[in-house]
Image: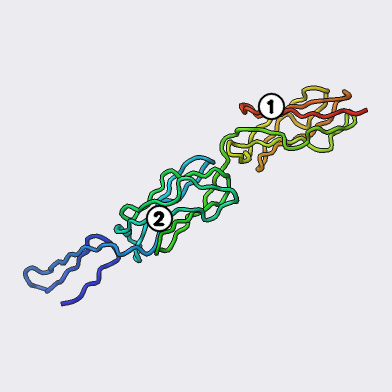
Amino acid sequence: STSWTLGALTGAQSITATASGLVGSPATFSATAIAGAATHLAITSQPAGGLAGGSFALVVTALDASGNVATSFTNNVVLTFGVRPGGASLSGGGSVNAVAGVATYSNVSITKAFSGYTLSAAAGGLSSAESTPFNIDAAAPSSVSISGGNNQSAIIALLLGTPLSVTVTDTYSNPVPNATVTWAVLTGGGTLGSSIAQTNGSGVATNTWRLGALLGAQTVSATAAGLPTSPVTFTATGLP
């Protein structure tokens, strides 16, 4: 006789006993290994990230000491932020009951753009798990607004001291990079540094404005096509 310690793999396992030359040899013994009690959590389907306000899925699994799914675990798993910026909020996280050791979050959403988010999963009595880092990018442009350079004055035909600037944001107030802004002189006959500019990583597009020869009010427009707050108008005063 001998003893048999099952391996770490759940399900059917077998061994043989051989007596050379005997009928019925080798004899096969079978056993079924089941998972042990849950000891730790693992995030087995990582968050993909995406655009602000979009949804993604995440799966958390309770494992035993050998890394097998602890199918007997049905307690609550709580999903929260690990790394986040100030002001970020998590929708679709919180507490979910595990089913056969698996907690599924199918509609997770974050509205604040940020690179390097992580999510943390915890359950009472188990070692917690943290996701791999992921990014949330700004959603589609929703608004354009003046952020600098308005209501200046200068001697006619001279360059204004402060560049004109606009900020393009999405519906969650995240700055939108690489948005196209078109600039045009409306009145006063001045000149601009460029007719088209792209927003930078902070959602800001800038331009220079040399006033025309007209005394008094002169105007320039900045347009981000398709946005309800577009165009915006800058005003400057030409002095003698």
Quarter of the image where the N terminus is located: bottom left
Dividing the picture into quadrants, the one containing residue 83 is bottom right
The amino acid type, in three-letter code, at marker 2 is Val
Dividing the picture into quadrants, the one containing residue 204 is top right
Above or below, 136 against 143 in this view is below
Task: Categorize mark 1 by other alpha carbons within 10 Å: few (<14), some (14-19), many (20+).
Answer: many
* Apparent side of residue 17 relative to residue 189 in the rendered image (left or right): left
Q: Which is more foreground, mark 2 or mark 1?
A: 2
Task: Categorize mark 2 by other alpha carbons within 10 Å: few (<14), some (14-19), many (20+).
Answer: many
Above or below, 172 against 90 in this view is above
How many numbered marks, from 0 up?
2
Residue under pointer 1:
231
Residue at the image position 8 percent from the left and 68 percent from the top: 24
* Apparent side of residue 133 relative to residue 236 in the rendered image (left or right): left
* Apparent side of residue 33 relative to residue 213 in the rendered image (left or right): left
Instruction: Using the image, tell me which numbered label, if any, was put on residue 77.
Output: 2
Q: Position of residue 33 (x, y in %)?
A: 24, 63
Q: Mark 2 or mark 1: which comes first in sequence?
A: 2
Q: Position of residue 216 (x, y in %)?
A: 87, 25
